Amino acid sequence: MERTYIMVKPDGVERGLVGEIVKRFEQKGYQLLAIQLFKPTREHLHEHYQDLKEKPFFPPLIEYMLSGPVVGMVWEGKEIVKTGRRMLGETNPLSSLPGTIRGDFCVETGRNLCHGSDSVESAEREIALWFPSGVIQWERTKVQKLIYE
Ligand code: UDP
Ligand code: MG
């Protein structure tokens, strides 16, 4: 089973969309392994977005991410890294289809509500960064058989 790191950004938290985003991953059949409200430091966000340090949008991205608390989550399921990103939508919300989180709830790339890991490797790196003491390992018994063949 694959794991991914999904994060509701400050705009999503302040707009009261945490439940909506959690709901979509729950309804899909994915399993929650960790969830926490964080007020990250600048250094922590630099670690998280280490691959984007040279991008022109990096400084405003960090200010945006520092503008309020975020909700970090670890979800587990089949092909969840790729599918999770499809559920979020495109980076630019105006290119995101209706039915996706960004397609349904936001307009601007710099206010795009949510983050999702872009590969299995970055997922594991991000999970270790945000949840260094680990996540809850638990088995769903009945429901697992209703979701997976
Ligand atoms: N971003 C931005 N302007 C851009 C590209 C990205 O403000 O031209 C922001 C946006 O919030 C995005 C984040 O930087 O979600 C990280 O960029 P990335 O390319 O990793 O997009 P994502 O993986 O979040 O879709
Ligand atoms: Mg990214």
Image (cartoon, grey):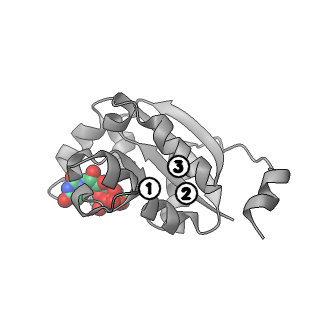
Who comes first in sequence, dot 1 or dot 3? 3
Which structural element holds mark 1?
A: strand
**Badge 1 density bin: few <14, some 14–19, many ≥20, Cα 10 Å:** many
Q: Which residue is mark 1?
A: 116
**Distance between the alpha carbons at the discs numbered 2 and 3:** 15 Å
Of residues 31 and 73, which is closer to you in this image? 31
**Label 1 beta carbon within 8 A of ligand 1:** yes
> From what the image shows, is residue 69 above or below residue 76?
above
**Spatial CA span between label 1 and label 2:** 7 Å
At a point 49% along the width and 68% down the height, the residue shown is: 82
Q: Quadrant of residue 41?
A: top left
Q: State how far apart marks 1 and 3 are (Cα).
A: 14 Å
Asked whether the viewer can see residue 51, the reply is no
Between discs 2 and 3, the one toward the N terminus? 2
Viewer-nearest residue: 70 or 97: 97
User: Any mark on residue 48, and which?
Assistant: none
- Looking at the image, do the residues carrying marks 1 and 2 touch, with CB atoms under 8 Å apart? yes
Q: Amino acid at mark 3?
A: Arg
* Residue 75 percent location from the top left of the image: 60, 52
- Percent position of residue 124, x then y: 56, 59
Label count reads 3
On residue 24, which mark appears?
A: 3
Q: Position of residue 26 (x, y in %)?
A: 61, 48
Q: In front of the other: label 1 or label 3?
A: 3
Question: Ligand 1 near label 3 (Cβ, under 8 Å)?
Answer: no
The amino acid on which the numbered mark 1 sits, given as a three-letter code, is: Gly
* Mark 2 surroundings within 10 Å by alpha-carbon count, few (fewer than 14), some (14 through 19), many (20 or more): many
Horizontal side, residue 102 vs residue 31: left or right: left
Return the residue at label 2: 4
